[in-house]
Amino acid sequence: MTRAWMRTVFDVQAIRQDFPILSRRVHGKPLVYLDSAATTQKPRAVIEALVHFYEHQNANIHRAIHTLGEEATAAYEETRAKVSRFINAPRPENIVFTRSATEALNLVASAWGRANVRQGDEIVLTQMEHHSNMVPWQRLAQEVKATVKYIGVTDEGTLDLSSLDDIITEKTKLVSVTQVSNAFGTINPLGKIIAAAHRRGALAVVDAAQSVPHMPVDVQAMDCDFLAFSGHKMLGPTGVGVLYARYELLEAMQPYQSGGEMISRVRLEGATWNDVPWKFEAGTPNIAGVIAFGAALDYLSALGMDNVRAHEQELTAYALGRLRRLEDIISYGPQDPSQRGGVVSFNYPDIHPHDVGTILDRQGVAIRGGHHCAQPLMRRFDIAGTARASFYIYNTLEEVDALVEGIEKARAFFSHDR
Ligand code: C6P
């Protein structure tokens, strides 16, 4: 197979050396990790940052008056500044650390939603949302007697914007949309949707769990009001999420959780709140995780997010081309790689995606099979789930070949079975 067209945007083999786990074997085969949309592997720099913190700096933050506490606080706040630069937020105070993208979205639904969404109001989502960007809004709507409306999905797996002006109306209080579908990889035209929301006076929330790790994201250019993502999907440790919000919104919002850290003064009669963003970070946060997330941001910044995007687009184009040549396979989402992230999602008509995943695992190839926490999207396509391979900076074209060989084996195995 000729690969003369491959543009080498960075040295993938050198990158692979930075990821200790990539040298392990699974069922006697070299690990081919194609499940980065679920969580990415971690480079040595991130693992070492965790160890360094616990070996040299471990202390609680924002309260200690000793050296360790001061160093830990400075390192934690430095990551906040790095996050704000990474997504071009106006200032570090726009960034709230949470446990996950899920918690960031729940924070908005709870702290902003309960105060601003009333009976008869409308919340607009899409049919392709991850459950984390659907269930919190459904619960809010049920609680305050608001209505949830959905932007539909075309047969190609893109958003159907033909009746956008009927869906987003003067009753709409908030529109919350994923930038990239975790299930199909579709990149959504956020500019159009955010502009429509703002024209009607509604706020725009972006679920960026599958975009910030994979492409340059500029919250000011995007003009969103809130944006959520997770550190573990971009080389960082689990247990760290990010909520970006416009400063005035954070100032006007009531706290999400209460307790230590988030207060200014507490009396028996009541309490006043800390400044933004700390009023949204009650209790001891994941200090080591946030600091190590800073190392992940350094790693990605050094590669350049344009390069990350170009690399994934190349892998995706190659994978789509190879999948197209497999008989009977159904591949979901737009076929144009420029309209999708580093995800390919597919099915054989008579084989359950879990079975495809199990056979691939025997070849050392890790993919995800199932509904990908997007059950309404699966229902729209009348399927139980899909098999999904998702790429990142450390994946190679040879690994795409290993995927396709594994798929062919699964196909042969189950044809034999029939
Ligand atoms: N998607 C996947 O395999 P958390 O779990 O909070 O870090 O991320 C939630 C989330 C929110 N939005 C989107 C678009 C996502 O893809 C995810 C996580 C994983 O696709 C786990 S289901």
Image: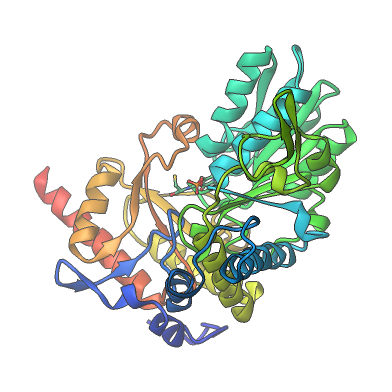
Position of the N terminus, as image quadrant, is bottom left
Q: Taking the image as drawn, is residue 38 in sight? A: yes
- Closer-to-camera residue (152/66): 66
Q: Is residue 14 left or right of residue 117?
A: left
Q: Relative to 74, does residue 341 appear above or below in the rendering?
A: above
The answer to which of 10 and 337 lies nearer the viewer is 10
Give the left or right position of residue 358, taking residue 245 as reference.
Answer: left
Q: Residue 27's x, y, as percent?
A: 15, 66
Q: Quadrant of residue 76?
A: bottom right
Q: How is the image coloured?
A: rainbow
Residue at point 26%, 45% (across, down): 354
Lateral position of residue 5 relative to residue 70, left or right: left
Nearer to us in this view, 191 or 297: 297
Where residue 311 appears, x then y in whole percent? 54, 74
Indicate left or right for 190 with 371 as reference. Answer: right
Quadrant occupied by the C terminus = top left
Where is residue 120 shown, x and y percent of the image? 76, 12
Q: At x 81% / y 60%, what residue is drawn?
A: 91
**Residue 67 location (% of width, % of height):** 60, 71
How many marks are shown on the rendered structure?
0
* Residue occupying image coordinates x 57% and y 46%: 101
Residue 156 appears in the rendering: no
Between residue 176 and residue 337, name the one nearer to us.
Answer: 176
Work out whether 276 lies above or below 254. Answer: below
